[in-house]
Image: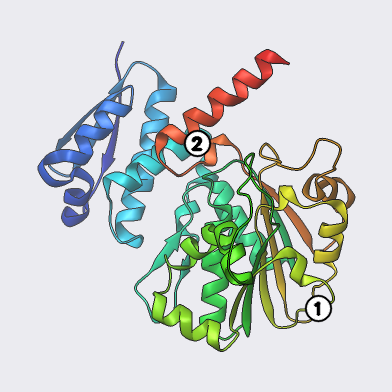
Amino acid sequence: MKIEKTIIVNDYPLLLQFLGQNDAHLKFLQKELPIKISVRGNEIKLFGKQVSDLTKAENIINLLLEMGKTDNGITLKKINYVLQAKESHLEKKETNFFSSSIKIPKSARQVTARTQTQADYLKAIANNDVVAAIGPAGTGKTYLAMAYAIENLLSNNVKRIILTRPVVEAGESLGFLPGNLEEKVTPYLRPLYDAIFDFIDFEKFEKLVAKSSIEIAPLAYMRGRTLHDAFIILDEAQNTTSKQMQMFLTRLGDNSKMVITGDISQIDLPRSTTSGLVEISEILKDVEGIQFVYFKNKDVVRHSLVQKIIEAYEKFNKDIM
């Protein structure tokens, strides 16, 4: 027995956005969803055998229509993100995560949350002085923190951005690196540079560095400092030791925010060394003003294969334990 649902769209340009050029969006949805969709006049009709399938599809389509009004249009890429995210966020109260966004001043660049956890992460940063984001690669932990930092710097909410990482090799030895300090540590800090250049060009970056408005340095160089009026990001925090993490956290000064990001499945420390990130998730979990945000595989927003790779490795590791 077939069940039917109807969505009325009185905004014709919005309906065209939903359909896509040559019905590309509609065809993609038909392929990915376990229902049939037809569009006649201003009606989007959904046909299926299960109420749950129709409800899921209805929620997805309504969210896409909302995006067409408020989020610079509907694209295949955004449809794919919605499909991934909605696998775990089908409740009606959780359909507005795309409204959480960061606008980069003096730029057309806008960064929008793509999952509910990302929206919760942005809210946590806004409401707390210290936020720790823990979860797998590709979930946007560092990228969103960087966007928030750039927005606050260019809006004059903070005077500088400080980006740091522990210098730990990921399973291979790079040997002796020639050159001055900057040249030696640049390979370790390259992912931070990559994130910055998504928001500002190289010339703007050089000017901000020259004014000490942006500083990128190894974690060891944070010792002895108090960081006022700053947005501070500690990346790859799973590779901090207990003492390094305590040292870093106690650098927090007035009018500053700290964001700590890491993936506890990718710890490169010696087996006998406790990760500072793992430790603080227990020690500081009840401290007011500090919030922990936990990302999961469903929050991966890189290539769709990344999520499958992470899940395959998790299954493999469980099987051999």
Asked whether, in this view, residue 69 is left or right of residue 239, the answer is left
Residue for point 20% across, 51% down: 17
| Residue position marked by numbered label 1 in the rendering | 225
Judged left or right of residue 313, residue 301 is left
The three-letter code of the residue at mark 2 reads Leu
Secondary element under disc 1, as helix, strand or loop, is: loop
Q: Which image quarter: residue 287? A: bottom right
- The dot on residue 75 is none
Q: Residue at x 58, y 53 (%)?
A: 141
Please indicate, yes or no, whether residue 285 appears anywhere in the rendered image: no
Relative to 178, say whether 155 is above or below: below
Asked if residue 119 is positioned above or below residue 30 in the image, the reply reads below
Choose the circle earlier in sequence order: 2 or 1.
2
Name the amino acid type tagged 1: Arg
Residue 233 position in % (x across, y down)? 66, 65
Q: Where 307 falls versus 73 (above or below)?
A: above
SS category of the residue bearing label 2:
loop
Question: Does the residue at mark 2 contact the one at mark 1 (Cβ under 8 Å)?
Answer: no
Residue depicted at 85% across the width and 65% down the height = 247
For the residues labelled 2 and 1, the Cα–Cα distance comes to 46 Å
Foreground: disc 2 or disc 1 = 1
> Quick check: can you spot residue 85?
yes
Query: Which residue carries the number 2 mark?
Result: 90
Q: Position of residue 248 (x, y in %)?
A: 80, 65
Residue 193 at x, y percent in the picture: 50, 65
Identity of the residue drawn at 61% across and 63% down: 185
